[in-house]
């Protein structure tokens, strides 16, 4: 079945949030970074402005700027209404209220859209679907990031997560996955089993971050070769 943009809820985060989620140090920010499932985040845009090296991968990069922009507008009102109905599930610390949330997300996505066509032409936004093989040699990237995708969507199954993270680890010297909970902000059996699998052959760390928006989603998984 073909992947459809109608199935996507685009919701972009900014560089500051990435720094907090992934505990990216000043030195980390100088490294060659691969960011998976980036969607309409402006991390790539903001890093490129600072002459940093980031390549973003996502299924939505097969679509045009116009199509993505239209989809963002289609889901914005629905997403904000859902947020309004579930405010008690979130920590209003880094983001203080719903207005700030909407402004932060829309600002990030507008920056992404302004950079999208240029970034595609420069090879910074690449259409790719995990766990398919990436067109890079081993250890091409220093750090691989996955935000709000791997371990969160448990319905994709154990094998999908293992194969996806193995491919990330093939092209990256280390990977960082945030958060390590499912869509209900609960650490799942799948996450525990996947983490146990990688403990056998890699250095695995779980650290608490300075970023928590949905209650309970404040831990980062780091896997190093």
Image: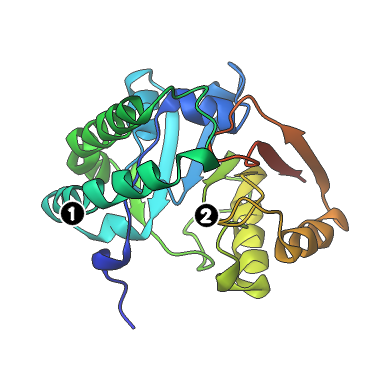
Residue 146 position within the rendered picture, expressed as x and y whole percent measured from the top left: 54, 47
Instruction: Depth check: give the residue in front, 41 or 122.
Output: 41
Left or right of residue 154, residue 124 in this image = left
Task: Please say which color scheme the image uses.
Answer: rainbow
In the current view of this chain or complex, which residue is farthest to the bottom?
A: 1
Residue at label 1? 74
**In front of the other: label 1 or label 2?**
1
Query: From what the image shows, is residue 25 above or below residue 135?
Result: above
* Tag 2 secondary structure: loop
- Depth order, front residue of 143/108: 108
Q: Nearer the viewer, residue 123 or 200?
A: 200
Task: Compare residues 96 and 145 and report the one nearer the observer.
Answer: 96
- Quadrant of res 173: top right
Provide residue 57's location: percent of width, then percent of height.
41, 51
Q: Which residue is painted at 35% across and 40% down in the image?
A: 12
Q: Is residue 147 left or right of residue 202?
A: left
Q: Earlier in the sequence, mark 1 or mark 2?
A: 1
Q: Residue at x 52, y 33 (%)?
A: 32
**Residue under numbered circle 2:** 149
Name the quadrant of the N terminus: bottom left
Q: Residue at x 36, y 50 (%)?
A: 82
Which residue is at the far left?
66
**Crowding near the residue tagged with mark 1, few <14, some 14–19, many ≥20 C-alpha atoms within 10 Å:** some
In the rendering, at what x and y percent does residue 153 appear?
55, 63
Q: Element under label 1?
A: helix
Residue 123 at x, y = what percent?
Answer: 32, 45
Report how far apart the C-alphas of labels 1 and 2 lie in the structure.
21 Å
Mark 2: give few (<14), some (14-19) or many (20+) Cα within 10 Å: some
């Amino acid at each position: 079945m073909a992947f459809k943009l109608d199935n996507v809820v685009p919701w972009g985060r900014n560089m500051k949030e990435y720094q907090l989620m992934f505990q990216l140090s000043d030195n980390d920010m100088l490294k060659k970074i691969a960011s998976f499932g980036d969607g309409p985040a402006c991390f790539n845009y903001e890093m490129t402005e600072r002459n940093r090296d980031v390549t973003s991968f996502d299924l939505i990069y097969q679509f045009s700027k116009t199509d993505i922009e239209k989809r963002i507008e289609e889901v914005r009102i629905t997403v904000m209404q859902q947020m309004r109905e579930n405010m008690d599930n979130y920590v209003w610390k880094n983001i203080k209220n719903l207005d700030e949330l909407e402004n932060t997300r829309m600002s990030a996505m507008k920056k992404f859209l302004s950079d999208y066509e240029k970034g595609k032409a420069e090879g910074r936004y690449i259409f790719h679907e995990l766990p398919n093989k990436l067109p890079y040699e081993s250890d091409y990237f220093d750090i691989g990031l996955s935000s709000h995708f791997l371990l969160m969507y448990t319905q994709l199954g154990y094998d999908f997560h293992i194969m996806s993270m193995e491919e990330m680890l093939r092209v990256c010297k280390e990977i960082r996955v945030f958060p390590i909970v499912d869509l209900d902000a609960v650490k799942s059996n799948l996450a525990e089993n996947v983490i146990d699998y990688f403990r056998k052959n890699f250095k695995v760390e779980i650290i608490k971050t300075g970023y928590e928006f949905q209650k309970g989603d404040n831990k980062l998984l780091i896997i190093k070769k």
